[in-house]
Amino acid sequence: MLRNINHTLVQILMRTRQNLLHMKRTIGYFVRMLTLLSFTLSLSACFDIVEDVTVHNNGTGFIKATMNMSKSKTKIASLMQLDKVDGMKVPKQADVRREMNNVISILQKTPGISNVQHSLDFNNFVGTLSCEFSSVAALNAFTSALSKRLEVNISGYSNYTFNSGSGVFERRFKPSPEARKKLESLSPESKKSFDNAYYSAIYRFDKPIRSVSNAQAKISSNKKAVMLKVPALQVVEGQINLSNNIQLSN
Amino acid sequence: MKIKTILTTLVLLQTIIYVQAQDLIHKVPAEANVLVTINTKAVFKHLDIADVDAFFQKVGILDSISTASSGSTNWMQDSGIDYDSKAYFYMQSTDSVQFFGSLIPLMDAYNFEKVVGANRTIETVNGLKSIYNRDRTIRLSWDDNTAYVLGANFVEYYFEMPEIRERYGLPEPVNQDFTYDYPAEYDDYVYEVVTPADSVYTEYDDWVTDTVKVADDWNMEAELSDTSNIEFVPAPPIWSDAYDEVDSILAQDEYADDYYLNYRLYTASRDSMIHILMNQWIDIRMEGIISGKLDSYAKQYKIGKMADDVIADLRLQDFGALYQSYLPAHLLYSAIGMGRMPKMNYGVEMVSGQLVVQGKKLLIRGDASLDKEMSRYLKAIYSKKMNRKFLPHLNGDILGFMSFKMDTESYIKYMPQIFQRYYGPMVGKYDKYVDIVALFFDIILDEKAIAKVFKGDNLLVLHGITPVEVSYTDYVYDEDYNYEEVEKTKIEQAPDFLWMFSSDDTRIFENLLEAGESELKVDNVDGVYNLPQSYGSALQLHLLIKDGIVYVGTNQAKLQEIKMNKFRQKGHKAYMNIANKDAFSVVFNTKRAPELFDRMGIPVAQSMRSTIEELGQYGDFVLRSSGVKRNKISAELSVDFPDRKGNALAFLFGLMSELVIK
């Protein structure tokens, strides 16, 4: 019975879809114009990702990740009025909140992670997530757990090590081939829309920094912080590598 | 003088009779529920036949039609088709079969045969040269003046009904127990397997040898003596071998777990038997069409003269029945455990459409003839007049507008009846629930009170785009990379529009605005209210209530002008006419599109650049409906194309050729 109803609904939907297609053709020209206009919604996506990590001498620390899409807030607000864009489902506020709660739950259950906090601002489209970690290994465990939850291989492409004895903090990074493949499938015009998207990584330490291996990383005046701010597009394309070997003073 | 007049009249009469005899509309069967007329003379008045030939040659369409066309550059001209007369395409749906046919006028049957008959077997059927497709469900025949095409598709559900299977001696469907026990998420997929719509054609080659052998032995000619009534049902043919063969295959153990193969074998066997039926029905029907024994469509329905600028005409008779034939009604009814679906009656008797070329303007006109009841409802609903105070807002520089006028009181009054009429028959015995829903709305809505709040005339004017200042969050870093959030601003382009509607009772809006003011969410600036911005939105909306009109727009200064009686503008006559006369309209000033793309900084792909730039030479895009006149509701869509090809059809054809060749 249920299967019959299911089949019936499928048929009705297919018929309805056909009828809609006919209607769509009838006003095809107008739709084309509107599509061209609405296409702008998916363009010029300006956003900032900021990863701010503090690592103390004993290996404990604090991480705060910020996703700031406020520069594109009008476009995102318009996008969120739609169900789908180019066949991709557009998440609603509730979806984002639900996913954030899942992440929080994973973080709270991860050994070595504490004081988990987050914020979601849907007026400006800014989201933050922060926590304290008891060791860099806990940070990697969190990344790994998150990879499983999001079914994205984050941990395979990025991890951290800290040797308090030698005073070396290292971030290893390799570009994700999946992300690169998706990017390559975009038209040059669509790729251009990511021109104003930046990724910033800030690492702070108790001791002064002696040297950094990444030429694009800049050391602060007090020598205790290093920042790497790079175009997100170039990171995905593999033109810029986020790997950095930071040697602290003894 | 008198004799001369009589002679002239006789000659003219003879010419008229000859012309009428030539028009193939008289051979279109009266039962056709879809009829498409192609006015080939009008087509080639607007298009150069050599260009069409060249285009078809380039895209390889002719190669698939005829092997004789290979290398020919004048296929269209040399095909023997008479392009001065009209060609007809029609379709007739019954519960068992769907016939589709065409009547193509010929001027040279010899050339036609040369083109279509090359490398094909030509048979003589009832004295006419004929070609069949492989499963003999499509037949093409021709005489000196006409090519007749007739094909048939069977309705699978009809031939799966037990009494019909029994009547025609068709095999039993494959037992559903063969179905693999799929996880629930694959339900849709299983369904596709159970009733594959095109299995006959897509899979035929693979197993045709087995099944054709089965069907060839099935001789039904003796039973099919009636020649006109396709509903006539012959006695079931005796054909035990076919059963044995199908049963033996189904009984084999190795297939027991392979539903696909069993199902394919079942459909192959069944389809080949039905195809024989189809073939017999096609031959009987074709004979009726050629001999003129079937009632003519032209006698049954009034066919008006087709003007020279009409390229094609479409007529759908008995729209409800036609729509119903496309609904998977049997599935719906079997799923909710009901018998046959009652006849649907939407109150739409006939739907017609025309493609018209008027110089550089292309029009698509559509009409629907309504029955008395539906005419009464819709006439009352679309009887509203537009508030004339709206019209000065339609100046010639606007980007576009949408007007919609509907009598709210009539809408609320008649909507329950229309709702009941649309959905009542669909749900069979549950129609009482539809009645209850309709009654519920009838009771709870006070149409007079609502009609005072929203009188029903609406005008939305899109002026274009306007720069607006938008704030965003950014970060400022100190020399030690400690950062703080700062608010910055940037300029974005947002739509600039004004929406207005009439209201005789604005209290509800005023009360809402007062409440908003008290909650500090709405500002009152000299009588113009600034509404709260929705999250993330760059749009600041303003509202003004004045002289029984509610204005909602993005331009505060304009609303202030209206408030102070300082708004002075003259409407564009053509736009005012549309908004004033039509019940519904959408107008887009296409020539402003390239400027819009530039101002919004929309990147345009190189391949689309010339197309976008050419939009600047287009005229208006207009979609309009004049509402109900007499018993007809009409709509029209028109586009003014650039003049570079002389007319709209040639321009569109050129554009299509350019795109295909690119």
Image (cartoon, coloured by chain):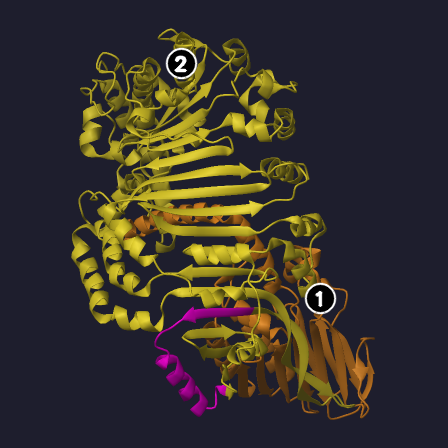
Chain colours: A orange, B yellow
Question: Is residue A10 placed above or below B257 in the rendered structure?
Answer: below
The structure residue drawn at horizontal position 54% and vertical position 37%, both measured from the top left corner, is: B357
Residue behind mark 2: B9
Residue A226 position in % (x across, y down): 77, 84
**Are the numbered discs 1 and 2 placed on the same chain, yes or no?**
no
Choose top left, top right, bottom left or bottom right for residue A209: bottom right
Q: Is residue A201 magenta?
A: no
Crowd around label 2: few <14 · some 14–19 · many ≥20 (10 Å): few
The structure residue drawn at horizontal position 27% and vertical position 41%, both measured from the top left corner, is: B176
Q: Nearer the viewer, residue A218 or A5?
A: A5
**Relative to A87, B21 lies left or right:** left
Q: Residue furthest front?
A: B1
Q: What amino acid is found at the position of numbered circle 2 in the picture?
A: Thr
Q: Secondary structure at mark 1?
A: helix
Residue A218 position in % (x across, y down): 81, 82
Task: Report if residue B160 is visible in the image.
Answer: yes
The structure residue drawn at horizontal position 61% and vertical position 61%, both measured from the top left corner, is: B397
Q: Please state the extent of the stretch shown in magenta in the rendering.
A: B497-523
From mark 1 to mark 2, how far is it between C-alphas?
83 Å
Q: Quadrant of the C terminus of chain A?
A: bottom right
Question: Is residue A245 placed above or below B426 in the rendered structure?
Answer: below
